[in-house]
Image: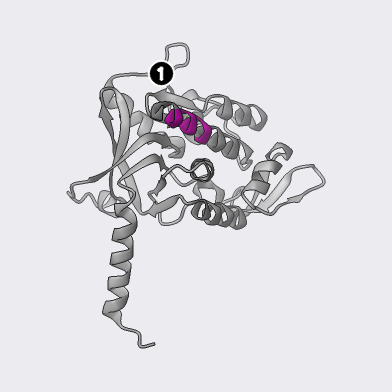
Amino acid sequence: MTINDIQITRSIIEEYYTSVKQLLECDVVIVGGGPAGMTAAYFAAKHGLAVVVLESRLAPGGGMWGGGMFFNQVIFQEEARELLDELRIEYKQNTEGYLVVPSYRAVAGLILNVDKAGARILNGITAEDVMVRQSKVCGVVINWTAAMKLGMHVDPLCIGARVVIDATGHDASIVRIYFAKSGNKLQPDEGMNIKTASMWAEKGEKMVVEHTRFITDGLIAAGMSVSSLFNTPRMGPIFGGMLFSGHKAAQLAVDYIKKERK
């Protein structure tokens, strides 16, 4: 075939426009394409929900890419074996009993299987605000990450959703925006402290799953957003808790939407 530059450009624009147009009103918007967000996307899409992942960077994967101190291997506890098998991520078990995966394989596996499950990933896009109607979070306000970093005055657009999942990591940016604008806060006995406690992987892995929950109607916190909000111990380069948190967030969203549709 003859390669034509204008045809190439037209193909990109037409396909992107068609794809994004279908996502403007969806079931679940997941902000953040790290391991928790991508796992949530996979399981929510597997349940037949219309799911879009917004990743502010060019590449999803979050903190997984760097492994531990740039040693590009990530660790999962034995209990994560079933989830890794479901996500078709190959691993090996070392003499310590942990499941070890090259970070690039873990990320590639997540991306591929999220896409195959039917979720869509929009990279280079930041959720800069939330949409709230009658005290319910019902979508996000989006803009190009590059425009925001350059400080350009570019008006945003919106994506509506029945459920928004904050998987933005340490920033917990969506929950923070919601609290800042609504005047609401976490329950007094839980507190809100945007930092993480000292390293304690065993405790941190459990607590991040325990605290994965609805923060308010229509808004779930998952992954390291949970750790930041509830000041749980940091867990370093072990990622089972991120998968479990994403899986729990997806199930919460599925149950919520099923109840809403009745």
- The percent position of residue 56, horizontal first and vertical second, equals 38, 49
State the count of labels.
1
Residue carrying label 1: 186
Figure quadrant of residue 172 = top left
Determine the secondary structure under disc 1: loop
Q: Magenta residues: mostly which secondary structure?
A: helix
Q: Residue at x 42, y 35 (%)?
A: 166
- The percent position of residue 162, horizontal first and vertical second, equals 36, 34
Q: Residue at x 32, y 71 (%)?
A: 11
Q: Residue at x 35, y 88 (%)?
A: 2
Q: Residue at x 40, y 47 (%)?
A: 52
Residue 112 is left or right of residue 139, and the answer is right
Which colour assignment does the render follow? one colour
Confirm whether residue 195 shows in the render. Answer: no
Confirm whether residue 164 shows in the render. Answer: yes
Which residue is at the far front? 262
252 in magenta: yes
Residue 129, compared with residue 100, is above or below; it is: above
Q: Quadrant of the N terminus?
A: bottom left
Count residues near mark 1 (Cα–Cα under 10 Å), then give few for <14, some for 14-19, many for 20+.
some
Decide which of 179, 157 is in the foreground and name it. 157
- The percent position of residue 245, horizontal first and vertical second, equals 55, 34
Which residue is at the far right? 95
Which residue is at the far top? 189
- The percent position of residue 234, horizontal first and vertical second, equals 57, 32
Q: Quadrant of the C terminus?
A: top left
Q: What's drawn in magenta, residue-wise? A: 250-258
Residue 156 is left or right of residue 59, and the answer is left
**Amino acid type of the residue that numbered disc 1 sits on in the rendered structure:** Leu
Residue 262, compared with residue 73, is above or below; it is: above
Decide which of 145, 200 is in the foreground and name it. 145
